[in-house]
Image (spheres, rainbow, N blue to C red):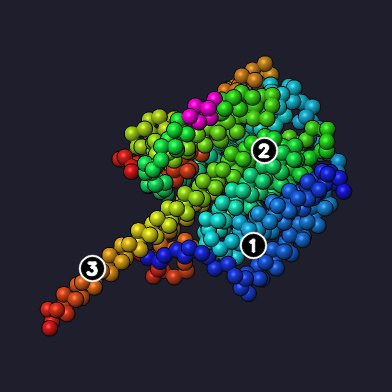
């Protein structure tokens, strides 16, 4: 087996100089194109901003994400799901090395910070309707919380926890699809929200998506399928 | 695009060029992943700069939504790519793709 | 030159230099740490361009989580390489002692 070198060879060889030249040419070409972008606002932006009050939320980005371009967000949640399936089918063992830390500071810090992060995640989710925030931001904080918990050697997902783990991962996509199908049945169009139920539907989808996103991001960090036995 | 955001669009293009150089020039897989992420950051910068409207006007929300989606998808792609890199390293012992077959353990 | 333009120029130069350093420094650990710093500076850029939702997502997911993934992969690779180095030297020792035993038997 070859050892990986600790320091890579990053000298500018002839081949790399050629690639650098090509990258430079590409940059200049793209910069020339970027300079020709028009100044006036595209019509889509004006329509989107005008119809935000009808969408059920007040934050225009959340309205676009969950209502106007809801199909794109559905596909994004599906991509998150597929990433976990891909990782679990490729790597049978976790990539992270769990051992008890030498100092008690990490454990104390984690026990202090994890409940705070849970509250912040829920708050960001709730806030996303009116201010910057939303499901992705809350899910990211949730995922970070779980990663901190793992890194402080408190816990690694194990195989017999899969009864809880798999529903957590699937609930975002499931809620999204169910809501979209509900809209199909009620209004006749995929992703056409009935106006008086829009806020509730968006909150439901965002809540489920937040749980899924948090679980998925944490499992991306673990980097492998859940193990049978205790690690470390 | 508004003149005050044009500087950010150009810097996004520069980041894209640097990222594609790192992706193509270095054999180490982790560097390729870094290059891909910097390329993505450049693209996001161009998108958000095109959505900027100036001091008081509300920015265009559609590119913001696209970039949030893009960030999450980029993280998933990075996670998958790093798992692939870990598997390659476990099987061949090298953190880069090797051309000859007899290097496999 | 207004204050805002000066701030923009300083921020952009810092972002570009940080990205170039992250991509071309020989030590991989240093490269990943610089990349995390680049991600946080990018969150700053999003705030400047009036995109607070993107800034929240970038600071948490874009730089923090991607940096954590890269660091965990790097440490897993180095740990496996170190173990392989130990095993290889163990095998070399075993092979050496077998050779010595064979030579001792012949003589």
Q: Position of residue C2 (x, y in %)?
A: 86, 45
The stretch of residues the image draws in magenta is: A112-119
- Residue A60 visible in the shown view: yes
Q: Which residue is mark 3?
A: C94
Q: Position of residue A59 (x, y in %)?
A: 71, 27
Mark 1 and mark 3 in contact? Answer it, CB < 8 Å: no
Q: Which mark lies nearer to you, 3 or 2?
A: 3
SS category of the residue bearing label 2: helix
Q: Circle 2 is placed at which residue position?
A: C54
Q: Are marks 1 and 2 on the same chain?
A: no
Q: How many marks?
A: 3
Of all chains, the one bearing label 2 is C
Classified by dominant secondary structure, the portion drawn in magenta counts as helix
Foreground mark, 1 or 3, reads 3
Looking at this view, is C31 or B101 the one in front?
C31
Determine whether label 3 and label 2 are within 8 Å by CB: no
In this rendering, is residue A203 above or below B81?
above
Q: Describe the element under mark 1 as helix, strand or loop.
A: helix
């Amino acid at each position: 087996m070859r050892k990986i070198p600790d320091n890579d060879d990053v000298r500018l060889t002839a081949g790399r100089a050629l690639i650098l030249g090509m990258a430079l040419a590409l940059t200049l070409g793209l910069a020339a194109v970027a300079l020709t972008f028009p100044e006036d606002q595209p019509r889509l932006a004006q329509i989107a901003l005008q119809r935000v009050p009808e969408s059920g939320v007040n934050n225009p980005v959340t309205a676009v994400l969950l209502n106007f371009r809801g199909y794109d967000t559905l596909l994004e949640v599906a991509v998150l799901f597929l990433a976990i399936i891909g990782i679990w089918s490729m790597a049978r063992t976790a990539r992270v090395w769990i051992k008890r830390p030498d100092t008690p500071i990490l454990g104390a810090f984690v026990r202090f910070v994890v409940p705070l992060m849970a509250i912040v995640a829920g708050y960001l989710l709730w806030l996303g309707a009116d201010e910057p925030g939303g499901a992705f931001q809350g899910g990211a904080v949730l995922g970070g919380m779980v990663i901190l918990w793992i890194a402080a050697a408190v816990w690694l997902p194990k195989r017999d926890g899969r009864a809880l783990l798999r529903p957590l991962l699937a609930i975002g996509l499931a809620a999204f699809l169910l809501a979209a199908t509900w809209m199909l049945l009620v209004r006749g169009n995929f992703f056409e929200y009935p106006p008086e139920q829009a806020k509730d539907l968006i909150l439901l989808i965002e809540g489920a998506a937040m749980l899924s996103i948090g679980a998925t991001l944490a499992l991306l960090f673990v980097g492998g399928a859940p193990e049978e036995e205790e690690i470390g | 695009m508004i003149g005050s955001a044009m500087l950010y669009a150009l810097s996004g293009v520069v980041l894209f060029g640097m990222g594609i150089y790192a992706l193509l020039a270095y054999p180490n897989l982790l560097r390729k992943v870094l290059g891909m992420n910097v390329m993505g950051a450049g693209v996001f910068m161009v998108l958000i700069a095109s959505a900027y409207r100036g001091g008081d006007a509300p920015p265009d929300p559609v590119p913001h939504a696209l970039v949030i989606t893009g960030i999450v998808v980029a993280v998933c792609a990075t996670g998958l790519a790093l798992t692939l890199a870990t598997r390659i390293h476990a099987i061949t012992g090298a953190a880069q793709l090797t051309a000859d077959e007899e290097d496999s353990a | 030159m207004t204050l805002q333009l000066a701030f923009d120029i300083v921020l952009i130069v810092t972002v570009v230099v940080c990205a170039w350093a992250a991509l071309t420094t020989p030590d991989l650990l240093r490269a990943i740490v610089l990349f995390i710093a680049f991600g946080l500076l990018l969150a700053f850029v999003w705030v400047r361009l009036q995109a607070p939702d993107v800034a929240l997502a970038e600071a948490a997911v874009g730089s923090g989580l991607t940096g954590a993934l890269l660091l965990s992969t790097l440490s897993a690779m180095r740990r496996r390489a170190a173990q392989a180095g130990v095993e290889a030297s163990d095998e070399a020792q075993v092979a050496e002692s077998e050779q010595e035993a064979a030579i001792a038997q012949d003589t």
